[in-house]
Amino acid sequence: MASKDALADRAGIPEGSGDEEASDSADGTPVAVGEYTWEDYKREYFYDEDGEPPRTGGEAVAFDESEALGFDSTRLSGRLSRGGTAASVLDGIVEARTVDVDPNVDEDEFFSTVEGHSTVVGRYDLERAVPLAKKSHFREVDRYWVNKPYAFVIIFHSERENERKYYVVEPHFTPIERDLREFLTGKLRTAIKYSDDDIVVKGGEESRGEVIARETKRLLDRYNLYEGDIAALASEPRAAGGAAEGEEGDDGGEEDASGVVARLKGLFGFEDEPVVRSGDLDGIAVRPEPALVEEDAPTLTEYQVEKLLYVLRRDFVGYERIDAIKHDINVEDVSCDGYNSPVFVYHTDHEQIISNVYHGESELDDFVVKLAQRSGKGISKRQPQVDCSLPDGSRAQLTLGREVSDHGTNYTIRQFKDVPFTPIDLINWKTFSLDEMAFLWLCIENHKSLIFAGGTASGKTTSLNAVSLFIPSQSKIVSIEDTREVELPQRNWIASVTRPSFSDDGKGDVDEFDLLEAALRQRPEYIVMGEIRGEEGRTLFQVMSTGHTTLTTFHADSVGEVIKRFTTEPINVSKTMFTALDLVSVQTSTRVGGSKVRRNKSITEINRYDAENDEINVRDVYQWQAESDEFLDTGQSNTAEEITFDRGWSPDRLGEELFTRRLVLAYLIERGLNTYTQVAATLQAFINDPDTILTLIANDELERSLEDLREMESVEIDIDPEKEEMVPRPDPLPEILEEVRGILREGESLLSTYEGERVDGLEDAVTSMAAGDVDPPGDLDDLDDLDDLDGPDEPDSPDDPDEPDEPDDPDGFGGFRPKGEDG
């Protein structure tokens, strides 16, 4: 007979209360589908092999339900009801005490690396990151890694507060681990202070991180805090959470070593010979569930060592508490408004949201001082505000103490994009229409000056970076900025940055005026200026008037405001000189369908100065219609007519040139070729040799040829694939896909003329207009000196066949020269 507890493992249901349709279980016992009856129980535990009840003295033994249950069978329903109630209560407790995650997220996959190992941070760390009181009303909206396998971000929606929350999840530290971290931090400061390693002072972030890891492992080995194989740990953090080879000792001195070791051994609860219990990071068991990682373990596990290495690198080399946020490519701004204030982030998708990151009062002061020092600046109560550029290129505004801020120390960091967005991204976001982008491409390629105007965070610099891909790679470019934000692929580019004076009297200060003056001596064809703020704008228009194409940004909400601010104090550009500008693109940050978006309100031409009415005539080429979220082409463009005249084109040729650029952009969108490398290589190759790109498109070989295209010597496209993968590039909207497919259908007749053609010597084809890989013999004061590169000993002769009176024009430029250039 079965034990009385047999039913405890099963859902016992009284006989005759369910479906009679039977099936066989895995062990051959026939059971009814969806229920377990007394008859099933009898067959399994009461009947013999022949299906007969047991016998005593030849008499069949009657089945006693109460005996099988261990209690009165009439009370079964009540007990089951109470069990169901208890289960519901337990479910409620679990629901209230655990985070409500997205059911569509496969957490085993999310918390695993590509090698199949578990990540250092896992579900346990997520549960510890969210306060118990908030778990009941937090609902997951999004999650993604920012520094795998150490840190990820999860976006919650608080149903109670009706707002979004930005939570950084990093490895959780127990009290003992926090004590050890504090101890190692102090010892590391001493070790680094007396280190002879030049990397500490001159090295990059990666090199200094290696020094931190090496010194940490020396400390762990010296004080016997890790009993595993130090040499077996990888020097770079592996995906599964491993760590690196180590060496002995630090320079922190021996005078207090015994006391420190005794204190830490007391904390970890072992004597002189600890038991080796270093955990294996492979497999699911690495996840820091309480049952797997004891908070009072006798020694450190490899998992704990990896956590320590991560947080020490983060604090010494990274950005401490906001390091994970700095790794988030979706974040545009990071700010803390004062003491006891949370860190706020401006998220690409979720806008301004509050995070779970806080600084203590003294910690916030120290952090701001550290940011200033890392930027090469000083900040103090004597000089409590500093604008600076962080080592990664981000802009920071720092304020120390309460002297000028009632809430105390604060900072705002404008993130620098390592990988810029492209024209394809702007089209897919619907910031610009495809026709607008093709028009800007034609204008910039043909030396038309452009200002991007708009309010704060309207996307001016993003657009400036994107359209800079339309600058021909053979052109000389000089950029002028107070903080590096412009990123160009062209090699013939001088990146100039302002520099404040090292003294209080301002002597030695290098400002935009100085850089513009120097730029004129550098003979640029394009000047890219990060932003015009003041009187340097007058100098810039003087440069424009001499024929130098200029691209820049400016704070203004309309073309009228642009003209007003430029032609009045303090900039005070004369209205006649203002007409040296060709185009103004006005951008705005607005809402469409409840979502915050960026739109190009208009592309406006600056035509001529009307002396009689003392006004500047302007004309909109494109306008954004807010009510329909569409872009209107007004059908008229004086700028396009100027290009037609300068290039010697017919109106039909102008239409063809615009269409081929629309076709190339449409092909990139339709094929999903949207990475920076793919777009930059295609655009620059097209500018150098349009027929080559059209041939590749017609024969569907463009994607396969991109590696060859990026080898042009006049451009340098070196993008980290891991960083590119993190860029949140948008997918095209359905209406955009419909438009580009229509353009491709329209272009079939054009592409058919290129079908079947072969592109031999692809690299030579796209670099035919690029400068040769030679060293010039000395400084070149005039373009005529370039002739000496081919043969400095040969006399210059008007009959030289290498110097025809009429230059060859294989690219169809029709003798066009940039504005103001004599040729």
Image (spheres, helix red, strand yellow):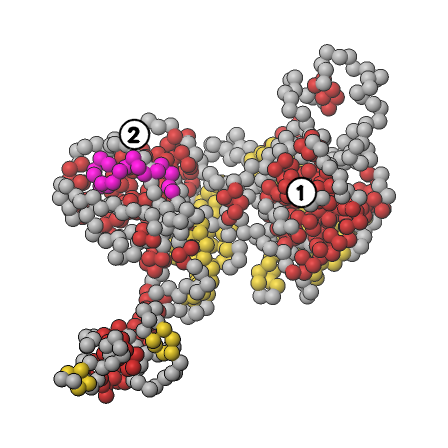
Closer-to-camera residue (585/118)? 118
Would residue 482 be seen by someone viewing this image from the given angle?
Answer: no
Residue occupying image coordinates x 37% and y 64%: 99
Tell me how far mark 2 sits from mark 1, CA to CA.
56 Å
Residue 531: name its quadrant.
top right
Residue 226 forms part of the magenta stretch? yes
Circle 1 SS class? helix
Span highlighted in magenta in the image: 221-238
Decide: few, some or many residues near mark 2? Use Cα within 10 Å; few <14, some 14-19, many ≥20.
Answer: few
Dominant SS type (magenta): loop
User: Residue 281: which numbered mark, if any?
Assistant: none
Q: Earlier in the sequence, mark 2 or mark 1?
A: 2
Q: How many numbered marks appear?
A: 2
The amino acid pointed to by label 1 is Leu
The quarter of the rendered structure image containing the N terminus is bottom left
Residue occupying image coordinates x 70% and y 19%: 789
Residue occupying image coordinates x 73% and y 49%: 662
The amino acid pointed to by label 2 is Tyr
Would residue 459 be seen by someone viewing this image from the given angle?
Answer: yes
Q: Position of residue 250 (x, y in %)?
A: 25, 32
Closer-to-camera residue (512/1)? 1
Circle 2 SS class? loop
Decide: few, some or many residues near mark 1? Use Cα within 10 Å; few <14, some 14-19, many ≥20.
Answer: many
Q: Is residue 191 above or below residue 418?
A: above
Q: Position of residue 364 (x, y in %)?
A: 37, 48
Q: Which residue is mark 2?
A: 194
Describe residue 327's horizontal placement relative to residue 420 as left or right: left
Q: Which residue is mark 1?
A: 702
Closer-to-camera residue (547/567)? 547
Residue extending farthest to the bottom is 74
Residue 36: name its quadrant.
bottom left
Residue occupying image coordinates x 55% and y 33%: 510
